[in-house]
């Protein structure tokens, strides 16, 4: 049996949310422990970079190392390669079960981020088929190309952003195609939906998107249905063929991926018979979108809300990042899928909430209001927005929290 | 250096990493200290990390960040680990996940 | 919305509801199943799949079990889909001499009743179970015990019943039961409309108390929570069920010699190898209401128990764990019965830890009760009014 450890604040997840929380809390003098199962701190920041509207590059790895630098404090212990698998509420906080033993903490912050929605299709268990995030991590974190030539499946924010990253790294891509039209795909397989999404994302990144979004919008105005207008051979975006009228029907290969079978679709996403063709690739990256990685909140006994705009099941929390369970806080993508800058702002806010609840924050109210404001600001100006309905959905979460709190007070 | 390693990324610079050796299914390979098993193997073009316990079909990594458990391999002295999260260390002995017998259906191991 | 009619409405799409519907449809009745969630979404997917006689008292208890076992072997042929049925027998293992003595008495008792029981000594155990702890004294075997995949079994019944004309209404909740002027069943109100029927079967498992209240009766069924761990796929440790004898010691009025936590959570090892060669490792027994949250202390306690009997388990990763609620009754027998005071209202619930074992016989008997036939087994010990009688 390993000996039990004690800490004042335990943060699960060393992504932007968890690291930002720690760096905003160390002045409290609390003993802070951050755990992460990935071998390096930084979470999904490590693999991200994008072009800002002024043409400069925002590089997640740099942001991460700055944050990690700031955690080098005597009262902060950052431990990587440690998985948390269980939580238990105790009278004085929480007991956390991890691969290095049990840790008791007064305050617990869950900052476990998001995970990817799988995209099942024929042949998807072949080695060489991976999630789009895996292609990102291999390329940008481990700096190994996922293969010699690949194809991206799924037209959504993450798929497009990472396609570009792959192109920048010199990975050869056959194109971006629609998700397969099957039981699991939903709207992703529909070209009209894909185009609507692209239009709403014209701020995603500079130049290329503006142009694409703009030109699509123009064509829409001309009264022509874009899906009839959009060229079947696709349009190049950052030199990657964007094939909005093409879907994938299967992945082929004996030992690992050798090719994919592509097919044309009509405007409702149905395959046009006879249009099937083979494309040689040695990897396939499936972009199914993200959902909050919230199992630990469920294990803790938190109640959940289902909000598609935020990526699915969300642990109930208020705007100060508190859950209904005492001394349990959440921050980052576990509260809804958004970009890393929002996660950082949320981490800071959670830190202030914890400091305030512990009676250690001077002018607590103002400081919290200020941090909440910062979250709003960052959200408004975020380069990458995952869903147009985020702000309204978040409001609903907070309202639900308040009404449930009131209920439990009166009963 | 294998052709899949990215050496000149226009935006990302990684510090020098020591080269170390480890084995996969008994074969000696080189990798970079601190990188996970799955990345070190991919750099050598090795994508097959295990055979499905029941069907024997080939499996590789899927998520690369520890969520899906598809990348299970055996490491001498550690047992089953996730190849996408477990860093290689000098002399590490890694073996692919194997197809197993099924005593209930009577299917024998290959 | 036009109102539907049916000969019988079955409330609950668990194994009991599906078995009842299947046997009713075989008799040509027009049946509607109303299930608030998914088929097998209740306890029937949060359990093991043992069909056991080994732990039953000889007499009515074990006869009911054996009869059900017989019906299951017929269902293997009758149903449209396969459900991982096999009958490798099961064993109970003893940790000390005292248990061996009690086990011996148990085996003699069962043999007299004509059941295929026998004692196993240390060598028998060791030769079958390479990975069993060395200090196990021995045990006993019941050669006919069998096992199924409970979810597949429920679905096999459902699919076949559907082919025979049963209408399955999932995601539909029963909200009220309509009675006529004489207090007899007239219809069932659901979240998607009214169904006229003169016969209703309450097969709502741990929720049957609530359904009973809709017609003003008290059904004495309470939820008894149990945890199960699922191991990852590894080398074969064994192919059939192993349970610890010590849990039966209470039947002999003796105390179990286990630590406080094991006692508190009612933990006793049930080791069940599945067809995919994972193991289900159970279980616990607690009265903690309807909450089904995993308690890590219970999980640890079960894991400790598993490692005590199979030391290799300490190196086998656990995939996940889950909890189910057993529909408990005060005398541990189910209620399979008419309710005399509410004509047309039947109960088929309260099978506690034996619902999978007893589903077939329950369904068969229910279909016989509803169609006024002679029942395959006597149903006196299963009558609803047995609880009312004892109260006075
Ligand atoms: C694959 C992927 C790629 C993404 N790419 C982009 C992108 O390109 N651009 C963008 O704007 N957004 C991207 N996102 C969204 C991303 O989630 C946010 O940008 C941001 O990183 C969220 O920060 P976070 O701190 O909430 O979580 P994360 O950055 O995900 O950090 C969470 C950390 O928690 C750790 N963790 C989780 N569970 C446990 C546990 N049980 N025990 C121990 N540690 C645990 C994880 O290892 C991880 O390091 C991506 C998300 C994913 C999943
Ligand atoms: C840990 C554990 C291990 C077990 N192991 C075994 C074993 O090895 N062998 C064995 O024989 N048994 C075992 N059991 C017991 C067995 O699982 C149960 O006895 C059996 O599943 C009960 O089936 P049921 O159909 O009565 O209940 P359920 O499967 O719970 O079905 C009742 C259904 O009614 C529905 N319902 C409730 N209210 C309404 C409403 N108002 N409207 C519509 N629908 C409603 C519910 O949604 C539910 O699906 C075990 C149980 C547990 C918990
Ligand atoms: S690839 Fe998903 S856990 Fe390793």
Image (tube, rainbow, N blue to C red):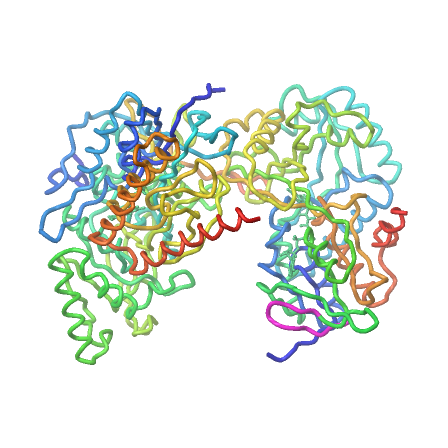
Q: Residue at x 79, y 28 (%)?
A: C103
First to last magenta residue range? C188-198
In the figure, C31 relative to C266: above or below? below
Q: Height in image: A401 above or below C189?
A: above
Q: Position of residue A77 (x, y in %)?
A: 32, 24
Give percent across and percent down for residue B86. 33, 31
Question: Who is closer to the viewer here, C332 or A399?
Answer: A399
The residue nearer to you, when weighing C247 against B79, is: C247
* Picture coordinates of residue A83, whole percent (x, y): 40, 32
Quadrant of the rendered image containing residue C92:
top right
Instruction: Please count the marks in the image.
Output: 0
Q: Main secondary structure of the magenta part?
A: strand
Image position of C226 (left or right of A321): right
Camera-side residue: C125 or C196? Answer: C196
**Quadrant in the picture for residue B90:** top left
C167 drawn magenta:
no
Residue C191 falls within the magenta-colored stretch: yes
Dividing the image into four equal quarters, which quarter contains ligand 3? top left
Does residue B62 appear in this view? no
C388 relative to A348, above or below = below
- Where does residue A150 sit, x and y in percent of width and height? 23, 52
As drawn, is A258 to the left or to the right of C136?
A: left
Would you say C26 lies left or right of C304 here? right
Does residue A132 show up?
yes
Residue lying at the far front in this picture: please name it: A363
Residue at 76%, 56% in the rendered image: C348
Rendered residue at 78%/64% (across/down): C345
């Amino acid at each position: 049996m390993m000996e039990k450890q004690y800490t004042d604040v335990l943060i699960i997840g060393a992504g932007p949310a968890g690291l930002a929380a720690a760096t905003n809390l160390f002045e409290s003098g609390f003993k802070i422990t951050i755990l992460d199962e990935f071998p390096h701190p930084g979470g999904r920041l490590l693999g991200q970079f994008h072009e800002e509207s002024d043409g400069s590059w925002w590089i997640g790895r740099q942001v991460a190392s700055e944050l990690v630098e700031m955690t080098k404090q005597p009262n902060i212990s950052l431990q990587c390669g440690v998985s948390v698998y269980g939580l238990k509420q105790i009278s004085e906080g929480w007991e956390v079960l991890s691969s290095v033993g049990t840790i008791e903490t007064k305050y617990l912050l869950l900052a476990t981020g998001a995970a990817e929605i799988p995209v099942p299709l024929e042949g998807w268990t072949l080695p060489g088929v991976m999630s789009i995030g895996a292609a990102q991590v291999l390329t940008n974190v481990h700096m190994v190309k996922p293969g010699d030539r690949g194809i991206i499946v799924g037209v959504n924010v993450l798929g497009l952003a990472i396609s570009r990253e792959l192109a920048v790294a010199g990975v050869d891509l056959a194109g971006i195609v629609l998700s397969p039209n099957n039981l699991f795909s939903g709207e992703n397989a529909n070209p009209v939906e894909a185009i609507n999404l692209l239009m709403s994302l014209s701020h995603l990144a500079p130049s290329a998107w503006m142009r694409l979004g703009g030109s699509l919008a123009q064509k829409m105005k001309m009264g022509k249905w874009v899906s009839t207008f959009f060229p079947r051979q696709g349009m190049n975006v950052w030199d990657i063929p964007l094939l909005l009228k093409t879907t994938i029907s299967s992945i082929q290969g004996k030992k690992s991926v050798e090719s994919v079978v592509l097919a044309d679709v009509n405007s409702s996403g149905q395959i046009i018979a006879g249009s099937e063709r083979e494309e040689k690739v040695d990897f396939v990256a499936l972009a199914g979108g993200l959902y909050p990685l919230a199992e630990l909140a469920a294990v803790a006994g938190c109640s959940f809300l289902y909000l598609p705009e935020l990526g699915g099941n969300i642990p109930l929390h208020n705007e100060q990042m508190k859950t209904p369970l005492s001394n349990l806080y959440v921050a980052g993508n576990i509260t809804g899928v958004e970009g890393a800058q929002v996660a950082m702002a949320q981490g800071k806010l959670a830190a202030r909430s914890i400091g305030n609840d512990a009676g250690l924050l001077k002018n607590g109210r103002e400081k919290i209001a200020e941090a909440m404001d910062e979250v709003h600001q960052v959200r408004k100006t975020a380069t990458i927005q995952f869903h147009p309905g985020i702000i309204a959905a978040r409001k609903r979460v907070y309202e639900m929290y308040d009404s449930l709190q009131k209920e439990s007070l009166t009963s | 250096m294998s052709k899949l390693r990215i050496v000149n990324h226009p935006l990302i610079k990684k510090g020098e990493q020591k080269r170390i050796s480890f084995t996969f299914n008994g074969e000696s390979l080189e990798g970079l200290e601190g990188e996970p098993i799955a990345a070190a193997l991919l750099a050598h073009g090795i994508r097959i990390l295990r055979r499905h316990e029941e069907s024997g079909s080939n499996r590789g990594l899927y998520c690369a960040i520890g969520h899906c458990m598809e990348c299970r391999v055996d490491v001498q002295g550690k047992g089953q680990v996730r190849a996408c999260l477990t860093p290689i260390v000098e002399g590490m002995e890694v073996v692919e996940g194997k197809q197993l017998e099924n005593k209930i259906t009577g299917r024998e191991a290959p | 919305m036009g109102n539907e009619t049916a000969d019988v409405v079955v409330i609950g799409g668990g194994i009991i509801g599906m078995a009842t519907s299947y046997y009713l449809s075989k008799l040509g009745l027009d049946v509607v199943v109303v299930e608030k969630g998914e088929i097998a979404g209740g306890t029937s997917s949060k359990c093991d799949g043992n069909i056991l006689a080994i732990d039953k008292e000889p007499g009515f208890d074990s006869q009911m079990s054996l009869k059900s076992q017989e019906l299951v072997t017929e269902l293997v042929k009758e149903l449209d889909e396969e459900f991982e049925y096999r009958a490798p027998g099961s064993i109970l293992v003893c940790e000390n001499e005292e248990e061996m003595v009690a086990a011996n008495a148990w085996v003699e008792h069962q043999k007299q009743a004509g059941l295929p029981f026998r004692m196993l000594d240390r060598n028998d155990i060791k030769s079958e179970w390479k990975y069993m702890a060395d200090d196990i004294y021995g045990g006993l075997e019941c050669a006919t015990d069998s096992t199924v995949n409970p979810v597949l079994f429920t679905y096999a019944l459902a699919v076949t019943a559907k082919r025979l004309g049963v209408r399955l209404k999932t995601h539909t909740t029963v909200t009220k039961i309509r009675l006529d002027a004489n207090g007899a069943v007239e219809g069932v109100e659901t979240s998607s409309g009214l169904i006229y029927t003169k016969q209703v079967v309450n097969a709502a498992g741990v929720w049957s108390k609530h359904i009973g209240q809709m017609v003003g009766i008290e059904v004495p069924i309470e939820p008894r929570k149990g945890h199960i761990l699922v191991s990852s796929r590894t080398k074969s440790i064994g192919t059939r069920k192993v349970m610890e004898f010590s849990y039966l010691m209470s039947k002999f009025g003796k105390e179990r010699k286990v630590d406080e936590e094991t006692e508190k959570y009612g933990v006793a090892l049930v080791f069940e190898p599945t067809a995919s060669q994972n193991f289900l490792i159970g279980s616990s027994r607690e009265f903690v209401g309807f909450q089904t949250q995993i308690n890590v202390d219970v999980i640890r306690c079960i894991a400790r128990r598993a490692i005590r009997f199979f030391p290799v388990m300490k190196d086998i990763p656990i995939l996940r764990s889950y909890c189910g609620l057993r529909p408990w009754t005060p005398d541990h027998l189910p209620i399979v019965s008419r309710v005399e005071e509410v004509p047309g209202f039947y109960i088929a619930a309260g099978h506690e830890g034996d619902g999978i074992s007893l589903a077939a016989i329950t369904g068969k008997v229910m279909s016989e009760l509803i169609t006024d036939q002679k029942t395959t087994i006597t149903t006196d010990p299963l009558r609803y009014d047995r609880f009312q009688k004892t109260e006075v």
